[in-house]
Image: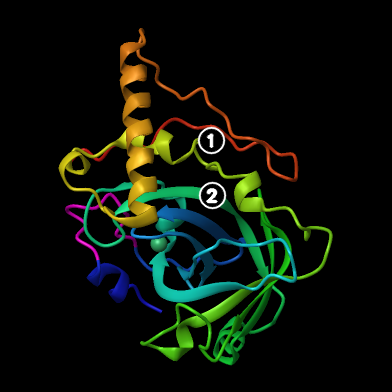
Amino acid sequence: MALEEYRRKRDFAKSPEPEGTVRPRKGRPLFFCVQKHLASHLHYDFRLEHNGVLLSWAVPKGPSLDPAIKRLAMHVEDHPLDYGEFEGVIPDGYGAGIVLLWDRGTWTPEVDDVDAALKKGDLKFTLDGYKLKGSWVLVRTSGRYAGSRGGDPNRTWLLIKHRDDWSGDLDIAEFAPMSVKSGGDFEDIVASDAPDVWLSNRPAKGGETGALLAEVIERGLKLKAERQAAAPPRRTRSKTSKSGPAGRKAPSRAPRRKRSS
Ligand code: MN
């Protein structure tokens, strides 16, 4: 797989997202992540490392730990491996909004041949993240589910948790909403990374998402002002996330480096 579609959709002079390369890595565990993305719609981007890129599905409602709940997962273009650590603000253009690294860890296929499983439309795997663990499956559907209208009928998949020690009726997205990278929420990302362009041109204006984004931006700008008013200037964020169901605390880190360009 290559990254042509990923690159075609983006202007890297304007976006902080990594340009990336196809980077196969041998002999180490495979990376996975989930990025909560507040863009034109809130969704969760579920990504699995395979053959040097991140296979990607956009999951509108996010993963569910309940095996009875099948979550729609739209297959989208492969992303570079470097994207897996990305968190920040996309000021403008494709995917404009806020990306929060919601979970990350490693994954293990439960099949010998991942390509054959993808072709067949039935990929079973085990996750070992902060929030998501245990056995899962991605199954391709015939495309009769909502949100699958038009386009490639092969895009529509379902993400389902298998019954095991890590399944349950906990709403994991609500229980553990924070970033595993910075420990913060969307507003903390805005507070450290608010783009000027949003003061005049917001990525989502109308509807529920527009209202949510406006609220997040307002809270983020207020946080930023409070932090700037505090002396001496703090170099790291003090806020830590709630611990996940595994009782592990998300590591806290300094805000993302700004691009020098
Ligand atoms: Mn997305």
Q: In x, y percent, where is residue 218?
A: 33, 34
Say whether disc 2 or disc 1 marks the residue closer to the N-terminus: 2
CA gap, disc 2 and disc 1: 9 Å
Q: Which residues are magenta?
A: 10-20
Q: Quadrant of the C terminus?
A: top left
Is-magenta flag for residue 102?
Answer: no
Q: Quadrant of the N terminus?
A: bottom left
Name of the residue lying farthest toward the right: 165
Find residue 102 and name its label: 2
For badge 2, the amino acid type reads: Trp
Q: Dot 1: what SS?
A: loop
Q: In x, y percent, where is residue 125?
A: 68, 72
Q: Is residue 107 left or right of residue 46?
A: right
Front one among 181 and 195: 195
Front one among 181 and 245: 245
What secondary structure is the stretch in magenta mostly built from? Answer: loop
Find residue 183 and name its label: 1
247 is higher (above) or lower (below) than 28: above
